């Protein structure tokens, strides 16, 4: 035995080490593979030996060979052996090899769990470090689950070296084992303030990675990051934080406002380009999130653009590249500021660096205008010719098409030019984008009617051109173009000059070499052409020519009948038989042309690509329901999706209405334009009748005008002026000025249209107006289609699993108690803990998280002690004490109430703290944010807050009332722990609490009213911000639960209203089995699921842990909506705490006001005027005295509480509109003078109007 | 996140490859070859960022590289990393190598790829930047090397102890 070992160690001297191996490989350049295979044999021998040093050496060599591409997974077990060596040297070799070649499907990995755990708890920090590093590369879900707890303990290790590695690896653990995120998060968050900058940086790193994928869960950390940003000097950390803010700010515009100033300061002060660049980037993100209505930020945009210009002009290509990259982000929202640097960007197109050219190409998209489109495209075409690589050329090709086709061909003034560009592009060899060109050709030919003749001519030449049909074209996809060509020639064959020639070209034998789907189009369109040809020939009374044509068809078609492609074969044989029959008729001198062309009669309309998907399911049609009885019981599971479907339907119903409406409006507008375009008098409308108004500033700010500009190739629709004489002067002035402008354009257009002959060259650069009167047909969509729902979410994103709500975890662990199942599993070999139940363990974590610094101090003392159990026990005692202290402090800070000592190791003790702390956490953020020194943030604040928990909103609303200089203090207080200040904050909090009680409404804003109102309410920046508002009013309340509700109509179904109820658990116990029941009246009924009786309650689909609130929606059917109604109801629920559970009930009265049947519907002034003129409406009026609020507040209140939208507003007079779910129009004219407000109202249903007015009156009597 | 770190020479011979996501050996070699192709045909005075690697990443990923004498240092990163920051990191990496190997050259990397890995492990862990401070990195690397040396000098006694 001993001899063997000695022999082994002597042998080792002759073993090759890594250096020898490398040297050997270098010396065997000719037969490297052979040499390596002998080496691998040697390695296999070495691995068989017992000596660990030999094994480690072999593994080390294998690692090198792995890099060269050799599969070494066969040695996985030996690698594990080396990993488990007690010596650091070998261990490191083993872990390195493992990190290079282990992966999830390596089966020996499961053998490593205990070894890794041992190494993690090794007294030698480098053993631990090496294990962590290795594990970070090959962690599997199993390893993550088994080791999560050990790693979490290491996050509080005494050595920062271990701490930072442990923190960093947690990200990998989260990815593989998402359940660990919640239990570990508090500690991770704590590490953000670790005294060691490396650990801090690691924590920032991990949270940034997490937040990048699921930003909304990390919003509450914003204040903490903000503090870090303003205090840290580490550029790495700063960059990460600033990047993180870039991801957070779209979710929270107020955050953006807060950020602008410090970021601008950083931009001015930093010398690090990397930091400067990231600052600029985030400022851009902020500006994008604020997007409009922030006039004072134009300075920031200017600053960004300026800095970027400096970067782009820099000789350093890297900066140039990044500058362009960031520029393209600004382009999306502030194209004007970028356009002024057009020169610079065009210059970059000529850069020798492809990366830079590509970036400049991206920017071009926003640079084009009608004026310079042709010029720019010409330049790009030159590049296309010069480009060597196909990738760059393809990129150019797609860019050209993108630029030209953007916003409905907005910038194309000459479609003949565009068609010729497309034809030129077909000459590109080897492009992958034949399909793209083809679809553009089709699109243009179909949608631009005026261009068809030209397009058909071009396509005919294209078909004639044999170069397209040569063999090598098939591979590169350019042959797709002939698909388009054949279709266009066939469909619009009436425009063909020489249809016979084209027909012949389409039936050439070479066509049979094209891909099947193209051949099929050829055959089909040959038939169309045939029809056209017949028609023209029969007209000439030349029967022989017609017969010859048929003969040609009969001769050529059999080639396609033999095609292997089914589609081709079927079409060809069909058409062949048809032609044969026609020939027979022809021989009898029967006129057939009419009938043949009838086969292909009718116009094809363009259909939007998503149209099919968006056809709404008709009322009463359930696609998932069985038509017949299901065949067997066993398939009852299939019913599941049905329930989901209907549920979804009600959920999304509200936003849908608006969209539908907008769609409708758009269509109406479209129709109007059509009408005007066809009106011969319209163009001639004499300019003399138009007064000249000099003052036309701010024309762009009228929303209506902006919308109209979106279809610029047509003369933007102007409402016919005689229809709304009643409308006020100011608005009309603007419109006339606008009209005048267009008129001028129009005249110019006509002139140029006449004078121009079509030319494909770019000579027409200066010609801004279309050469043809072009009518771009919009793509058809089904009625009631939903515009772009986001269907592009990747369902396979691994980060989806990490979308875990962390907010209620807060600063202290387990605000939402970590359920037992959520606790990290602990291995049983720690017998002591395991015996004490998982709850104990989870608590230990909690405790540890709260004591990072102190614990580390203590650990230093105990470091040398080997007896772990003892140490643990001791530390636990210590922690226990500290925990109490700590929590008391925390309580103090949060609500200043007397706090009972918390019973340890019980989830429920933490539960007790839930109610206030959760709200405080969120409200802290809100409070922090609401201090942003920007006026008019209420609007946004409200919208944002709507997304958050309702409880928080109250506080945020209150926060706005607090003194303006307080904020800075509180911001610091949150993070610093100065006792004095805490008290101050506490007072504030109490104040807030009081206010919260006073006003019982939450300023929930709904996605439907919100956007519309902010435009239409006319709340201009300079006006003071609106007070917060909420439509949620108290339904019922007792000591356990509080319910607030809001009622919204369902436009789609005139007999439905949706009642949203927020249930808030006010007690310390769990509320479950909630059942919501209402006593139906004749008029209003609660919709119950099929199969339940008319008196059954509805189960609320969630349970409420203490302090939590959640919203449920109930659908009611109503018949008449002209009268308000009250429905009695009961909520029953079970209150469950540790000892007992009791049944409780709460009665309530649901009040269906008439207002709740109204739906915010935007209305354009012309339609509004028509409506009033129609005389169908009955009037009523109302006078309010002593209304003491600014007019815009008044309007906002009416809009918000009563679902109206502002149609027009002049000074202190405004017209408003709303529509009921059953289609009643309600029009208001609100006038205010002093404290008196008079409301004249009209509605087609007088009873309803009376009730609505009463309700409005009541709203204002309350304030 | 950093997806991969590659070092190869002017001829495309890999000198170090570290993938933070698993690929088969063949794919790894393909990635190295492709990356080499993309990087090597670029002029010296163009920017150090590159998009369009087919095998690795996707639209969110970028290649960020630096070329030193005979070696290319390439980092494949996603959009959460700062481009300029990574360039700085490569610089730190090279300077650290320079300190640890005393005037590093390609040969050092050829013969001591394990050491390079060890140094890299102190900078980047599991695709995330661990440490950017060169002194700290060198300190940790030295400490570990010292430990290794103490073990090596301790090695011979092992068989002797067994004999007794």
Image (cartoon, rainbow, N blue to C red):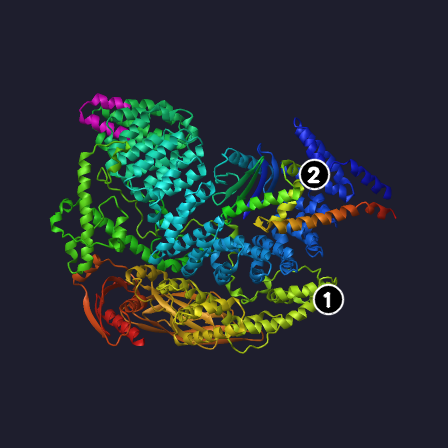
Figure check: A629 above or below A553: below
**Residue picked out by circle 2:** A61
Q: Pick the quarter of the image with the C terminus of chain A.
A: bottom left
Specify which label sits upstream in the sequence, 2 or 1: 2
Q: Mark on residue A870?
A: 1
Verify CB contact (< 8 Å) between mark 2 and mark 1. no
Q: Nearer the viewer, residue A908 or A483?
A: A908
Helix, strand or loop for the magenta stretch, by majority: helix
Could you tell whether A1230 is left or right of A140 in the image?
Answer: left
Q: Which of A1192 and A342 is in front in this view?
A: A342
Queried whether the magenta region covers residue A543, the answer comes back as yes
Queried whether the magenta region covers residue A267, the answer comes back as no
Determine the chain carrying the residue at label 1: A
Q: For residue A793, say whether it is visible.
A: yes
Q: Percent position (x, y) of residue A251?
A: 43, 58
- All told, the count of numbered labels is 2
Give the class, few, some or many, for how many residues have Cα within 10 Å of label 2's Cα (few <14, many ≥20).
many
Q: Mark on residue A926?
A: none
Q: Nearer the viewer, residue A673 or A135?
A: A135
Instruction: Determine the residue positioned at 20% across, 34% down.
Output: A756
Q: Quadrant of residue A192?
A: bottom right
Instruction: Determine the residue positioned at 27% across, 31% down.
Output: A760
Q: Distance between the residues labelled 2 and 1?
A: 44 Å
The residue stretch that appears in magenta: A528-550
Have a look at marks 2 and 1 and say if they share a chain: yes
Judging from the image, what secondary structure is the residue with disc 2 in? helix
Q: Percent position (x, y) of residue A788?
A: 37, 50
Q: Pick the quarter of the image with the N terminus of chain A.
A: top right
Q: For residue A1109, say whether it is visible.
A: no
Q: Which residue lies furthest to the right in this view?
A: B164
């Amino acid at each position: 035995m001993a001899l063997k070992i000695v022999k082994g160690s002597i042998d080792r001297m002759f073993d090759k080490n890594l250096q020898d191996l490398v040297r050997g490989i270098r010396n065997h350049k000719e037969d490297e593979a052979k040499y390596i295979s002998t080496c691998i044999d040697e390695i296999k021998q070495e691995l068989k030996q017992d000596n660990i040093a030999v094994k480690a050496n072999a593994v080390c060599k294998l690692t090198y060979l792995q890099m060269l591409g050799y599969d070494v997974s066969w040695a996985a077990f030996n690698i594990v052996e080396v990993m488990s060596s007690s010596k650091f040297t070998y261990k490191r070799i083993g872990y390195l090899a493992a990190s290079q070649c282990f992966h999830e499907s390596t089966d020996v990995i499961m053998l490593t769990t205990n070894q890794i755990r041992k190494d993690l708890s090794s007294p030698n920090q480098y053993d631990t470090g090496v294990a962590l590093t290795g594990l970070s590369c090959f962690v599997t879900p199993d390893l993550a689950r088994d080791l999560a707890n050990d790693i979490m303990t290491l996050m509080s290790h005494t050595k920062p070296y271990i701490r930072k590695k442990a923190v960093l690896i947690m990200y990998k653990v989260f990815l593989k084992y998402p359940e660990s995120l919640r239990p570990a998060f508090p500690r991770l968050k704590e590490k953000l303030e670790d005294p060691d900058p490396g650990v801090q940086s690691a924590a920032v790193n991990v949270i940034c990675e997490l937040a990048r994928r699921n930003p909304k869960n990390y919003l509450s950390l914003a204040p903490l990051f903000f503090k870090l940003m303003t205090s840290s000097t580490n550029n790495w950390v700063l960059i990460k934080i600033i990047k993180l803010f870039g991801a957070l700010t779209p979710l929270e515009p107020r955050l953006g406002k807060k950020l602008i100033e410090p970021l601008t300061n950083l931009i001015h002060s930093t010398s690090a380009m990397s930091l400067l660049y990231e600052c600029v980037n985030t400022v851009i993100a902020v500006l994008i999130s604020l997007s409009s209505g922030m006039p004072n930020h134009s300075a920031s945009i200017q600053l960004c653009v300026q800095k970027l210009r400096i970067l782009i002009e820099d000789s350093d290509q890297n900066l140039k590249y990044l500058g362009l990259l960031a520029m393209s982000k600004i382009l999306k929202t502030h194209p004007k500021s970028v356009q002024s640097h057009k020169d610079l960007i065009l210059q970059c197109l000529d850069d020798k660096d492809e990366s830079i050219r590509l970036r400049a190409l991206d920017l071009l998209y926003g640079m084009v205008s009608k004026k310079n489109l042709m010029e720019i495209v010409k330049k790009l075409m030159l590049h296309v010719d010069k480009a060597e690589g196909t990738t760059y050329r393809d990129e150019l090709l797609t860019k050209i098409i993108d630029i030209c086709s953007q916003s409905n061909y907005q910038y194309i003034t000459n479609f003949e030019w565009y068609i010729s560009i497309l034809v030129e592009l077909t000459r590109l060899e080897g492009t992958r984008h034949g399909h793209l060109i083809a679809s553009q050709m089709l699109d243009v030919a179909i949608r631009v009617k005026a261009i068809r003749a030209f397009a058909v001519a071009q396509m005919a030449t294209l078909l004639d051109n044999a170069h397209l049909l040569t063999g090598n074209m098939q591979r590169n996809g350019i042959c797709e173009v002939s698909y388009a060509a054949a279709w266009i020639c066939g469909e619009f064959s009436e425009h063909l000059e020489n249809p016979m020639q084209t027909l012949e070209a389409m039936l050439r034998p070479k066509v049979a070499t094209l891909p099947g789907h193209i051949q099929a189009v050829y055959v089909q369109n040959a038939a169309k052409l045939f029809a056209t040809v017949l028609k023209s020939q029969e007209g000439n009374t030349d029967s022989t020519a017609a017969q010859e044509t048929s003969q040609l068809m009969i001769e050529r078609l059999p080639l396609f009948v033999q095609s292997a492609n089914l589609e081709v074969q079927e079409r060809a044989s069909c058409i062949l038989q048809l032609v044969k029959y026609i020939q027979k008729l022809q021989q009898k001198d029967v006129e057939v042309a009419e009938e043949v062309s009838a086969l292909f009669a009718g116009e094809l309309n363009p259909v939007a690509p998503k149209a099919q998907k968006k056809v709404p399911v008709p009322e009463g049609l359930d696609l998932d329901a069985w038509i017949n009885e299901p065949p067997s019981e066993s398939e009852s599971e299939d019913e599941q999706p049905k329930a989901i479907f209907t549920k979804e339907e009600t959920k999304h119903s509200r936003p849908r209405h608006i969209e539908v409406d907008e769609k409708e409006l758009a269509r109406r507008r479209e129709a109007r334009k059509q009408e005007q375009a066809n009106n011969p008098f319209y163009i001639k409308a004499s300019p003399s009748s138009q007064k000249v108004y000099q003052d036309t500033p701010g024309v762009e700010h009228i929303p209506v005008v902006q919308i109209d500009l979106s279809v610029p190739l047509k003369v933007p629709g102007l409402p016919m002026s005689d229809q709304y004489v009643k409308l006020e002067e100011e608005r009309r002035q603007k419109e006339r000025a606008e009209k005048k402008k267009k008129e001028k354009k129009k005249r110019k257009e006509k002139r140029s249209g006449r004078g121009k002959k079509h030319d494909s060259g770019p000579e027409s650069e200066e010609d801004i107006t279309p050469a043809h009167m072009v009518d771009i047909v919009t793509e058809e969509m089904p009625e009631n289609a939903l515009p772009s729902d986001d269907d592009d979410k990747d369902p396979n994103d691994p980060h989806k699993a990490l979308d875990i709500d962390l907010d209620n975890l807060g600063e202290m662990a387990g605000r939402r108690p970590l359920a037992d199942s959520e606790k990290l599993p602990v291995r049983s070999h720690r017998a002591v803990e395991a015996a004490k139940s998982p709850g104990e363990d989870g608590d230990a974590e909690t405790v540890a998280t709260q004591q990072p610094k102190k614990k580390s101090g203590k650990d230093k003392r105990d470091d040398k002690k080997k007896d772990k159990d003892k140490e643990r026990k001791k530390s636990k005692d210590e922690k226990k004490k500290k925990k109490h202290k700590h929590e008391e402090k925390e309580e103090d800070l949060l609500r200043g109430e007397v706090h009972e000592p918390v019973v340890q190791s019980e989830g429920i003790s933490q539960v007790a703290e839930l109610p206030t702390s959760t709200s405080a956490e969120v409200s802290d953020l809100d409070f922090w944010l609401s201090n942003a020194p920007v006026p008019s943030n209420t609007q946004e604040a409200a919208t944002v807050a709507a997304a958050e928990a309702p409880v928080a909103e109250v506080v945020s609303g209150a926060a706005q009332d607090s003194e303006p200089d307080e904020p800075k203090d509180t911001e610091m207080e949150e993070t610093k722990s100065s006792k004095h200040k805490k008290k101050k904050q506490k007072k504030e909090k109490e104040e807030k609490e009081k206010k919260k009680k006073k006003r019982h409404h939450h300023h929930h804003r709904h996605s439907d009213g919100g956007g519309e109102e902010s435009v239409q309410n006319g709340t201009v920046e300079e006006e003071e911000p609106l007070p917060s508002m909420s439509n949620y009013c108290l339904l019922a309340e007792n000591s356990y639960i509080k319910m607030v509700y809001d009622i919204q109509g369902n436009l789609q179904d005139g007999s439905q209203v949706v009642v949203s109820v927020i249930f808030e658990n006010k007690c310390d116990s769990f509320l479950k089995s909630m059942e919501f029941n209402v006593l139906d009246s004749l008029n209003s009924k609660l919709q119950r699921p099929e199969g339940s009786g008319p008196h059954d309650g509805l189960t609320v689909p969630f349970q409420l842990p203490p302090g939590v609130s959640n919203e449920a929606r109930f659908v009611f059917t109503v018949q008449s909506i002209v009268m308000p109604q009250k429905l009695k109801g009961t909520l029953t629920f079970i209150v469950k705490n540790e000892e007992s559970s009791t049944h409780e009930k709460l009665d309530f009265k649901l009040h269906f006001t008439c207002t709740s049947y109204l739906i915010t519907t935007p209305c354009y002034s012309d339609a509004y005027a028509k409506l009033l003129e129609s005389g169908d409406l009955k009037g009523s009026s109302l006078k309010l005295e002593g209304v003491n609020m600014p007019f815009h507040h008044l309007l906002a209140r009416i809009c918000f509480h009563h679902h109206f939208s502002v149609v027009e507003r002049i000074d202190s007079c405004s017209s408003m509109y709303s529509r009921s779910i059953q289609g009643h129009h309600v029009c208001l004219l609100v006038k205010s003078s002093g404290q008196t407000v008079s409301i004249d109202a009209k509605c087609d249903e007088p009873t309803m109007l009376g009730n609505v007015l009463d309700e409005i009156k009541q709203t204002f009597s309350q304030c | 996140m950093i997806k991969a770190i590659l070092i190869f020479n002017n001829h495309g011979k890999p000198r170090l490859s570290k993938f933070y996501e698993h690929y088969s050996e063949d794919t790894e070699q393909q990635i190295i070859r492709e990356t080499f192709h993309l990087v090597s045909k670029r002029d010296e005075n163009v920017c150090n960022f590159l998009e369009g690697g087919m095998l690795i990443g996707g639209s969110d990923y970028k290649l960020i590289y630096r070329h030193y004498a005979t070696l290319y240092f390439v980092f494949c990163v996603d959009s959460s990393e700062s481009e300029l920051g990574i360039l700085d990191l490569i610089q730190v990496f090279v300077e650290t190598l320079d300190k640890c190997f005393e005037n590093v050259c390609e040969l050092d990397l050829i013969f001591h790829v394990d050491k390079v890995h060890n140094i890299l492990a102190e900078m980047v862990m599991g695709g995330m930047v661990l440490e950017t401070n060169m002194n700290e990195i060198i300190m940790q690397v030295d400490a570990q090397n010292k430990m290794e040396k103490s073990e090596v000098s301790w090695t011979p006694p092992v068989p002797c102890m067994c004999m007794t």
